[in-house]
């Protein structure tokens, strides 16, 4: 059985986590050894289960998956259902590491992106804090949770930072009463029953306190409300967001109150070929000055959309361009749901497991984003997912290749200990083994040779000048 980290080290996904000092962050967040299994192996098992299996239970039941972890599924369930673990801090520190690595390479505006998505649990009945939530996509009530996510983007990269799992007021199953009120799990349970606008400000404050730098907060029309805009402005951040075309909302323009449709008539007619119709500077109810940019609705060019910006120094084109970065979070949600099985991987009833698996999805996206930034080609999340999956499938072959070569290396000493060869002939036998392996390596194709040299240990090195394999016993 392979119960050490070497079985995971030869793939790009775990290599990305190593670059981000994942092991040190685990210790600082209260993650410790479970059932005599190192926590790093347990976490790697949790994070890589989704690439080749439907979940951690299937991985531990599989012979191949069990050989990588050498522990039962109970070890993983103990981690995901532990209310003492600070999953939010782990995601925050990991995102901070990634952002600090990629920030010096970019000079464009840095933005926070705020949005939410539904995590459905349609067949669940006794999941803790399960509630009926309105899905704005399907326009119906569903059973599940709302995943409020704060992401960071510079236009090229999109990094999920932290999230909050929220229940609606229509709770089906109440929370447990046996949880220690001092734990992180108890705090997250109280948090789950608060309003999303209050939690949004809390997430932004935690990201700023962690040292993550941003100038704007991008949000859709649901979040672009006056109270939230005022709260974000107090944090010295500007807001850029879509505004609802409501007849009940008024904006002050030239000391008079107007709706968005009435303000549209105040804008001078722009070019027929321009997608930006014009802009106006208005005041909100709280006295905050804002700029309203009217753009053409692509779905119906006879209608318009309105983007609000509290940064009056930006031009209309810069406001529209900056708001376009908001749609990067939709790609993160798509990767989490369709590739990383956000809504299907978790089958637990505890609210702690809901938090844990949503955090695991964030960690996977962060690692895959680091892989994308370090690769020479601009790969998508889907291609990175498939590459990691193929690499993990190759791991059992590489472990077998290492074991086979180690048997060859130890063969001369074992023959000498058994008396099959004389003591003075050990060097001759080693030379014969070396020549045989050299002949084999020279006979195979360059692709297989590079593959073997990549995954085997340091005993075999390739001399490109002399075209020879060097073996150290």
Image: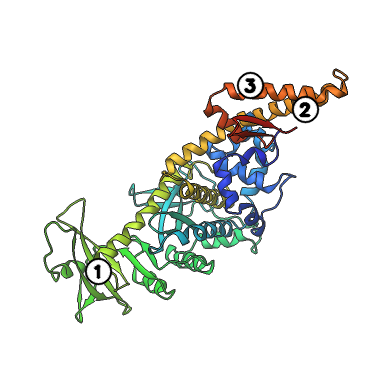
Q: As displayed, is residue 274 above or below residue 378?
A: below
* In the rendered image, the vertical position of residue 127 relative to residue 416, given as above or below: below
Q: Quadrant of residue 455?
A: top right
Residue 383 % position (x, y) = 43, 39
Residue furthest out toward the front: 466
Residue at 51% x, 33% y is 390
> Which residue is nearer to you in this view: 352 or 449?
449
Q: Which residue is mark 3?
A: 439
Tell me where residue 90 appears, x and y as whole percent.
58, 57
Residue displayed at 21% across by 66% down: 247
- Residue 5 drawn at (x, y percent): 67, 42
The answer to whether mark 2 and mark 1 are in CB contact below 8 A is no
Residue 240's image quarter? bottom left
Task: Of the two numbered discs 1 and 3 on the same chain, state the one appearing first in sequence.
Answer: 1
Above or below, 155 relative to 365: below
- Please say whether residue 89 is visible from this viewpoint: yes
Q: Please tell me how crowded label 3 is: few (under 14), some (14-19), or many (20+) other residues with Cα within 10 Å.
A: few
Query: Crowdedness of circle 1 by 10 Å Cα count: few (<14), some, many (20+)?
Result: many
Residue receiving disc 1: 292
How far apart, in angstroms, are the residues tagged by discs 2 and 1?
75 Å
Lower sequence index among marks 2 and 1: 1
Spatial distance from mark 2 to mark 3, Cα to Cα? 19 Å
Looking at the picture, tell me which residue is in the foreground, 244 or 378.
378
Q: Nearer the viewer, mark 2 or mark 1?
A: 2
Color theme of the render? rainbow
Kindly tell me whether residue 348 is visible in this rendering.
no
Q: Position of residue 416 (x, y in %)?
A: 85, 23
Q: Quarter of the image holding residue 72?
A: top right
């Amino acid at each position: 059985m392979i119960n050490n980290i070497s079985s995971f080290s030869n793939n790009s996904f775990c290599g990305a986590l190593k670059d981000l000092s994942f092991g040190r962050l685990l210790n600082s967040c209260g993650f410790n050894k479970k059932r005599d299994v190192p926590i790093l192996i347990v976490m790697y098992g949790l994070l890589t289960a989704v690439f080749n299996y439907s979940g951690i239970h299937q991985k531990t039941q599989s012979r191949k998956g069990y050989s990588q972890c050498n522990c039962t599924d109970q070890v993983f369930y103990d981690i995901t259902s532990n209310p003492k673990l600070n999953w939010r801090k782990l995601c925050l520190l990991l995102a901070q590491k990634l952002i600090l690595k990629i920030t010096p390479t970019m000079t464009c505006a840095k933005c926070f992106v705020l949005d939410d998505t539904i995590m459905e649990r349609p067949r669940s009945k006794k999941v803790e804090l399960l509630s009926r939530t309105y899905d704005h996509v399907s326009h119906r009530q569903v059973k599940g949770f709302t995943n409020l996510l704060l992401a960071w983007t510079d236009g090229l990269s999109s990094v999920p930072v932290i999230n909050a799992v929220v229940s609606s007021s229509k709770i089906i199953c109440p929370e447990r009463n046996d949880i220690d009120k001092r734990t992180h799990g108890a705090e997250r349970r109280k948090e789950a029953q608060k309003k999303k606008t209050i939690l949004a400000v809390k997430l932004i404050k935690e990201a700023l306190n962690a040292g993550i730098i941003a100038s704007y907060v991008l949000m859709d029309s649901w979040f672009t409300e006056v109270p939230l805009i005022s709260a974000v402005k107090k944090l010295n951040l500007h807001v850029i967001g879509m505004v609802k075309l409501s007849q009940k909302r008024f904006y002050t323009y030239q000391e008079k109150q107007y709706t968005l449709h009435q303000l549209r008539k105040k804008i001078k007619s722009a070019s027929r070929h321009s997608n930006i119709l014009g802009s106006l500077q208005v005041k909100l109810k709280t006295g905050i000055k804002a700029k309203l940019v009217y753009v053409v609705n692509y779905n119906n060019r006879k209608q318009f959309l309105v983007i609000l910006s509290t940064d009056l120094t930006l031009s209309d084109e810069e406001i529209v361009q900056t708001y376009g970065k908001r749609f990067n979070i939709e790609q993160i949600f798509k990767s989490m749901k369709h590739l990383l099985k956000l809504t299907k991987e978790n089958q637990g009833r505890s609210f702690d497991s809901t938090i844990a698996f949503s955090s695991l999805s964030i960690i996977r996206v962060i690692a895959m984003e680091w892989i994308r930034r370090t690769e020479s080609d601009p790969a998508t999340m889907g291609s990175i997912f498939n590459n990691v999956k193929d690499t993990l499938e190759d791991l059992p072959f590489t472990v077998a290749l290492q074991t086979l070569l180690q048997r060859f290396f130890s063969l001369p000493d074992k023959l000498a200990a058994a008396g099959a060869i004389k003591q003075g002939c050990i060097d001759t036998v080693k030379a014969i083994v070396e020549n045989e392996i050299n002949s084999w390596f020279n006979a195979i194709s360059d692709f297989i040779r590079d593959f073997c040299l990549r995954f085997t240990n340091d005993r075999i090195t390739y001399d490109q000048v002399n075209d020879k394999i060097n073996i150290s016993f």
